[in-house]
Amino acid sequence: MNKKLTLTLLGTVAVTSIVSLTPEAVHAADHISVHHMSYEEFDDKVNAGDNILSLEKSIGLDWTITAELGYDTVSGASPSWGPTTPVAGNQDLVNRAYDTAAAQNKTNQVIRSGKDPYRDGYMIQKYNLEDTRYSASVNVTYRDLERNEWTLGGNYSQEEDYKSMGVNGQVLIYADSRKNRSYTIGSSLLFDKTLAFQKYDNFKNVQEWENIFNSNFEVGLSQVFTPNFYTTFTLYTGYKSGYLSNHYLTVLREIDIDDNGKIEDDEVFLGQDSRPDKRLSGGINIQGFYNINSWAVVRPRYKYFMDDWNVSSHQLGGKLNIKLTDTLTLAPGYSWYTQQGANFYRDPSANDPSFAATGYATSDLRLGDFNADAYELGISMKVFDSWRVNALAAYYKQSNGYESSWWVLGTTYEF
């Protein structure tokens, strides 16, 4: 599994979970929060932990500063293709190395070591991974005379084989003094570097730093329809370029090294996960907020996504905030997700999971066809006038067998 994706997912889910438990916190008093999240993929894959310290401080009525520090850990096993047939002596080892070299001379794709002499000898195996990440971000918001909001921020994170630096900005403009309608325009830029396995040379995997550029842009409309109901509509687009493959994953490639016009069992090799170096995406996100009464709020949501890799998805779900007492709130939620996979994806459990000698190729389940269900239950409790405790548990399952769960626990102090 891509460590960067896991670590990023942790921060995103943790922050989203905190906000979803206490939506009123968007305009709350100055506060400092500490939260921990534990994430686990089933079948002994990835285990990760995320620790977040956040601060929000208003300066007068016009300025607000938010800052966040994060420390993440990830360990476990990343599933990838690998050989299973034992090496039968030195001559067998030499023959495998010779065949691998011959395959490398026939394709521009990176071929890893570890050839299996039998097509059926390759299996998805677990390779150990372990890493930590340190992150920091700061955002400053200014409100003008019409109370429109102008936000500018920056972020930085670093782990052993990945570095990220970014900037973001957003403008919120009210349509009139009644503030029943507002418009938002936001954008972010990320300038990342990843230490990727680029080639196999002299029986060693050689790593090189590769650049990744990531940009996102969105425009939104928020409309109050009644005192109890309002909705936000957001159009978004994204563009990525650079090294977008996952160098922790492998694929199987068929290479006719003896030029006899057919692929024998011993002509299947391990190749590098290979994806286009550009990705353009976009979609729409619709979120509703409806107050049933003084103690219950329904928040339905629909999101559509598509990109030029042929990936498209629909997500439909919602959350319910139930105020049981003045100090205790429950927030159950459910979402259903369906995805059409990339046009260069092949299911590793298919009868023939191998690819041609050249061309884009991935067996990453996240880029395949699947449906998914996600369940969560959050609790927010005000224990003292200035202290609030938040907790959340969630479970996620895909139709391709992938399962994960996570929980969040934290506290917020208002001052």
Image (spheres, rainbow, N blue to C red):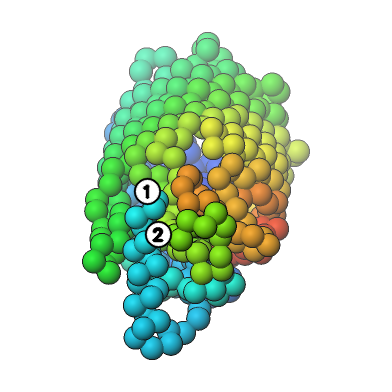
View extreme (right): residue? 292
**How crowded is the residue under tag 1: few (<14 C-alpha within 10 Å), some, or many (20+)?**
few
In front of the other: label 1 or label 2? 2
Is 210 displayed left or right of 385 in the figure? left
Residue shown at 40%/51% (left/top)? Answer: 107
The mark found on residue 211 in the picture is: none
The residue positioned 58% from the left and 43% from the top of the image is 342
Answer whether residue 250 is visible to the viewer in this image: no
In the structure shown, which secondary structural element does the residue marked by tag 2 occupy?
helix
Expressed as whole percent of the image width and height from the top left, the position of residue 52 reads: 38, 57
Residue 142, quarter of the rendered image: top left
Residue 114 in the image, given as x and y percentages of width and height? 40, 72
Q: Is residue 200 left or right of residue 29?
A: left
**Along the horizontal axis of the image, is 19 left or right of 33?**
right
| Relative image position of residue 290 (x, y in whole percent) | 70, 35
Image location of residue 320, percent across then percent down:
69, 47
Specify the label residue 108 is tagged with: 1
Residue lying farthest front?
Answer: 260
Occupied quadrant, residue 111:
bottom left
Q: CA distance from mark 1 to mark 2?
A: 10 Å
**Given the image, on which type of amino acid does mark 1 rest?**
Asn
Front residue of this view, candidates 224 and 371: 371
Query: Camera-side residue: 199 or 70?
Result: 199
Q: Which residue is mark 2?
A: 103
Dot 2 amino acid type: Ala
Q: Is residue 348 visible to us here? A: yes
Viewer-proximal residue among 402 and 56: 402
Give the vertical position of 143 relative to 370 (above or below): above
